[in-house]
Amino acid sequence: MSSSIIQQNPFQSMLDRFNTAADILELKESLRQKLQRPEKQVTVNFSITLDNGEERNFEGYRIIHSTALGPSKGGIRYDSDVHTEEVKALAAWMTWKSAVTGIPFGGAKGGIICNPKEHSKSELEKITRAYTKALADTFGPNKDVPAPDMGTGPDEMGWLMEEFSLLHGKPIHAVVTGKHLNAGGSLGRVEATGRGVSIITLLTLQKLGYNAQTTSAAIQGFGNVGLHSALFLYEAGVKITAVSDVNVALHNPEGLNIPELILYFNLNNRSITGYPKADVIPHADLLLLNVDVLIPAAKEDVITAANAHNIQASIIVEGANGPVSSDADEILKNKNITVVPDIVANAGGVTVSYFEWLQNSLNQQWPVQQVNTRLEDILNQSFADVFAAAQEYNVTLRIAAYVLAVKKVAQTHLLKEAVGRGKNFTQN
């Protein structure tokens, strides 16, 4: 486990924001404690036979934060640095993200401690199927619905679905989302998170009186989220002056030609290294560029108390989960930087995952225009609700989003408890 993970605890950042919202809502201590803690936390150990015949053991997790609003929903990470504090934070963020977006899901997250780049495709399939078997009683279309995350994709989700279906003796497509189209995936799912980030960014610009055509932006991360965010914002007229991937950060103050960069990226083994029409800058400097909009779309805790004072952007739109640690919130607020939180900004992915789950459940396939129109409608409403709540409570957009989400989950939790007490009273 790296020292940076120890110093910046994403679960503590989530709790700090949660407790601020709970104070505003005056939640009772007992309910506050229930909503903070995961409903279920499972650690599994399993082994597979590697291609060279060696037996290798693996440890995996599945943490279900809440099922108050519906089946828990969340990705599975394959990463050598996966740890329970991170998974707990990600599970909780999924709860609040679904609640504030109006999606009838709870929050969950999973992970396996492994480096997927060190394993062949056949080994990854064995790992996925063994993990599925170990958690067969946890997963289910009306219980807990996994999805892709760091280190996983449609292949892993397909294997999980197949294994779960084999265990139950029939095809159960709705047990996972993020599948290949021929396995029940949804049109529009691949680009959904990036599309959502761009929709929320443009809504923010409009609300704050910016003209997209004269707005500059820097995007940290050129994976699925960063790449699509860059493309859709470029198409809307925003000048993208900097992007980065794990290897290099590129800067061109005149603006990058994003379609050309994506073509280069795809032809260059999915890397932007060596792109000739930009200068290479240190990764840390990208976050500090003088741009209108900064979109951290790579990983957690990249903006902290250590660098928040030096942020020059006027707007931060969180494309990644938890890119701003809680110790930076007050600094950014005092600098009058508008931060659009992850649980609003990157909710496009869970929204279209919900559409996929719904299509599977109804045995339907929606055209991409229907998917994108519904996505835009939901995100428009979510953004309007959060902005109105920020004004009503006189708080930041982040705290407003948490207030709305925590309030919804708390009310549903109390209602279910009341119904449960009524049933017990009737039975007695």
Image (tube, helix red, strand yellow):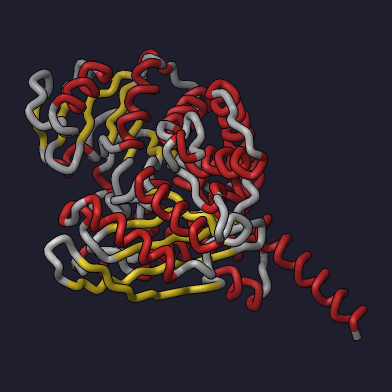
Q: Residue at x 92, y 78 (%)?
A: 426
Taking depth in this image into account, of 91 and 116 the one nearest to the observer is 116
Image label count? 0
- Image quarter of the N terminus: bottom left
Residue 6: x, y in percent? 26, 69
| Above or below 83: residue 77 | above
Taking depth in this image into account, of 180 and 268 the one nearest to the observer is 180
Q: Determine which quarter of the picture holds residue 76.
A: bottom left
| Above or below 369: residue 393 | below
Can you see residue 340?
no
Q: Residue at x 20, y 35 (%)?
A: 244
| Above or below 131: residue 367 | above
Q: Determine which quarter of the picture holds residue 403.
A: bottom right
Q: Determine which quarter of the picture holds residue 170.
A: bottom right
Residue 153: x, y in percent? 35, 45
Can you see residue 428?
yes
* 416 relative to 409 in the view: left or right: right
- Image quarter of the C terminus: bottom right
Taking depth in this image into account, of 290 and 9 the one nearest to the observer is 9
Q: Residue at x 51, y 44 (%)?
A: 350
| Above or below 175: residue 218 | above
Residue 332: x, y in percent? 37, 47
* 320 relative to 374 in the view: left or right: left
* 378 relative to 419 in the view: left or right: left
Q: Residue at x 53, y 70 (%)?
A: 137
Q: Residue furthest bottom?
A: 428
Residue 146: x, y in percent? 47, 55
* 389 relative to 169 in the view: left or right: right
